[in-house]
Image (cartoon, rainbow, N blue to C red):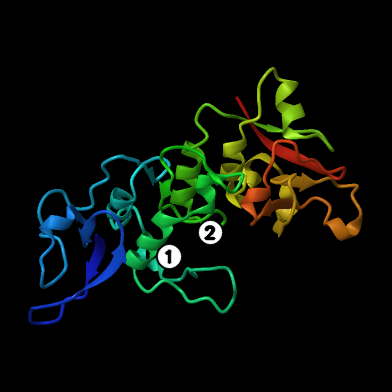
Amino acid sequence: MLAFKPSIPAKPPFKADTSFQMKTYLVGYVCNAVSVNSRSRCCPPKGEKFSCHECNLLSQCCNSYEYCVSCCLNPALTSKEQVLKMKVAKPATARTYTSVFDYCAGRCRHSSESVVHENAYISDFHHCFSLPSNSSSGKNSTLIEARLNGINVVVGRQGESCNSVCKSRGQLCVPNKLAVLNNCDIIQKYMSCKGSCLSSVGSDQPAEVVYDAPMHLNPGSCLYTETVSMLSCDGLHQHTRRLCPCA
């Protein structure tokens, strides 16, 4: 069973680019495998285009891969200009996405932001197509904030874990929201950040380095981590104040 985005020449027949999955696509259409045209290997253009069935438009996450790709292909939700500038992986030598379909097919299949503790999904809506953290536009930042509905975002005291911060308020730290806070646009709304937000490594992030910290720790700067699996409610550091999701 396949997922498709065709490249259509001036005259038929044409072949579609493919990505293996349970159902099939033709530029935003979803269909069962039995409906695929045997020559073009694509869906008939019937039904709702760019369907977001079984998707949460606030979080931009879906509970099925098929509709995640379909919804992601909607130009009103995914910016082609931004996507084509993004790298498929973090190394400097990594290629950029060749098309919006290329991005959607890959992004919906795997996203570190939909996983917690490396081997468990945050929720049933774990097929997500939103832009990765810290590469978001203002529009996407608003969508990220929507994921914090019902969450009290609290700045902790120096050297305090989020478990301790939330417990002092009679609440619990919500671990699967740490990845949402792990975004410079969000961090800078709650912390001064002294004009800088730096990538770092540590279970105490997102956080702000206290002003009396040693100079090599960049006092006053805010920190986020690119290793989402390290995020923890237990994490703490003697020279940082944490940004915590409590509920």
The residue lying toward the viewer, choosing from 15 and 96, is 15
* Left or right of 102, for residue 116: right
* Left or right of 232, for residue 80: left
Q: Secondary structure at mark 2?
A: loop
Residue carrying label 2: 135
Q: Position of residue 58 (x, y in %)?
A: 40, 40
Do the CB atoms of the residues marked 1 and 2 lie less than 8 Å apart?
A: yes
Quadrant of the rendered structure where residue 16 is?
bottom left
Q: Secondary structure at mark 1?
A: helix
Mark 1 vs mark 2, CA separation in Å: 9 Å
The residue lying toward the viewer, choosing from 98 and 31, is 31
**Who's the residue at 48% across and 77% down the image?**
95
Mark 2 neighbour class, 10 Å CA radius: few under 14, some 14 to 19, many 20 or more: some
Residue furthest top in the image: 170
Q: Position of residue 199 (x, y in %)?
A: 69, 59
Name the kind of residue labelled 1 in the image: Gln
**Who's the residue at 16% across and 65% down the image?**
42
Residue furthest bottom in the image: 10
Q: Position of residue 174 (x, y in %)?
A: 61, 31
Residue carrying label 1: 82
**Who's the residue at 7% across and 82% down the image?**
11
Name the kind of residue labelled 2 in the image: Ser
Mark 1 neighbour class, 10 Å CA radius: few under 14, some 14 to 19, many 20 or more: few
Q: Position of residue 233 (x, y in %)?
A: 70, 36
**Who's the residue at 29% across and 58% down the image?**
73
Tag shown at residue 231 = none
Q: Is residue 73 above or below residue 64?
A: below
* Left or right of 179, for residue 195: right
First in residue order: circle 1 vs circle 2: 1
Quadrant of the rendered structure where residue 81 is?
bottom left
* Left or right of 243, for residue 61: left
Q: Looking at the rendering, in which quadrant would you find the N terminus? A: bottom left
